[in-house]
Amino acid sequence: MTWPCRVRRGEALVPEAWGRVLQPIRIYLFTVPALLVIGAFFVYPILLSVNLSFTNFTGVGVANYIGWANYERFLSRSRYLNSVGVTIKFTFLVVVFQTLIGLVFAALLHRMPAIRNFCRAVLFTPAMMSFVIVGYVWQFIYAPYTGGLNAFLSAIGLESLARGWLGDPSTALFAIAATHVWMFVGYTTAIFLVGFANIPSDIEEAGRLDGASSWQRFRYLELPLLAPSFTVNIILSTVGTLKTFELPFIMTRGGPDRATNTLSLEIVNNLFGSYKFGFASALSIVMLLIVVAVAIVQNIYLKRREDNQ
């Protein structure tokens, strides 16, 4: 019995049956480098954190197994539960205002093509800046006596609203959220502009011919077609904000009175401040579960919303 063969000039004879077997294997071989990177820098650290979360490891010495004690400590201490609440509140503020403001900017720039590219670059510039620079600049702006915000309020006759924005527990989290929104609203605007660009021009033209106003075209034609852009923006901003650490750390160190103490700050403080590697690992796993759960719920809801449009 002879094998059916495929012969090409300069190539060895390869049985056709073996070729069909090797073809999918060759395809999967291209994924090996990516899988190795994911395994080394994503899967292995997570497994290591899970293992450390059940120990009292302090960075040196032996890691003694203590069971669920770290997780019980997290659930029994109000400061850690409060940090979760602060994180969720901060994320809600940032995602809502960043999405709405980015949508408004994108809608306006979509109708002003002459200055669209320039404004898009200007809005996107803060997202390319260092968190450290942005944190210290806005810390100066919010300063109670020499800050630009209070000076501006005094200049327009609203000195009664001036206060120590970062020193007041009732305003500190809102001040940091505003800084975060200012930094990344250009990123959100750019995604929405891509969504506007993907809207077929004949749909907008049909709306104009039917006598629809600019608001009516936006509300009934453009907004439903921007559902994919909403999905991308909301998921990216939610996941990024839930893990936020830099701005609260630089601007307030988690104060005043733990008003801006996010879960990321608790992880860093326990890891590098108290050298509680085991407990910090437990907090990291809690954060991972929160981020994954929120991302899955959002993705299911937003994808279902896209399908219903």
Image: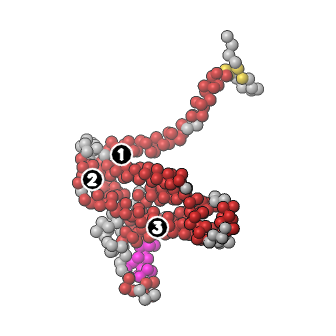
Q: In the image, 122: left or right of 71? A: right
- Judged from the image, the secondary structure of the residue bearing numbered disc 3 is helix
Quarter holding residue 264 = bottom left
Image quadrant containing the C terminus = bottom right
Which residue occupies 39% across, 86% down? 159
**Residue under numbered circle 3:** 97
**How many other residues sit within 10 Å of disc 3, few (<14), some (14-19) or many (≥20)?**
some
**Residue under numbered circle 1:** 49
**Residue under numbered circle 2:** 74
Which residue occupies 41% across, 66% down? 93
**How many numbered marks appear?**
3
Q: Could you tell me how far apart the alpha carbons at marks 1 and 2 are, in whole angstroms?
A: 16 Å
Coloring scheme used: secondary structure
Q: Which amino acid does label 3 sit on?
A: Phe
State the image coordinates of residue 284 (x, y, percent, origin top left).
Answer: 35, 51
Which residue occupies 53% across, 41% down? 34
- Judged from the image, the secondary structure of the residue bearing numbered disc 1 is helix
State the image coordinates of residue 295 (x, y, percent, origin top left).
Answer: 44, 52
Q: Nearer the viewer, residue 96 or 271?
A: 96
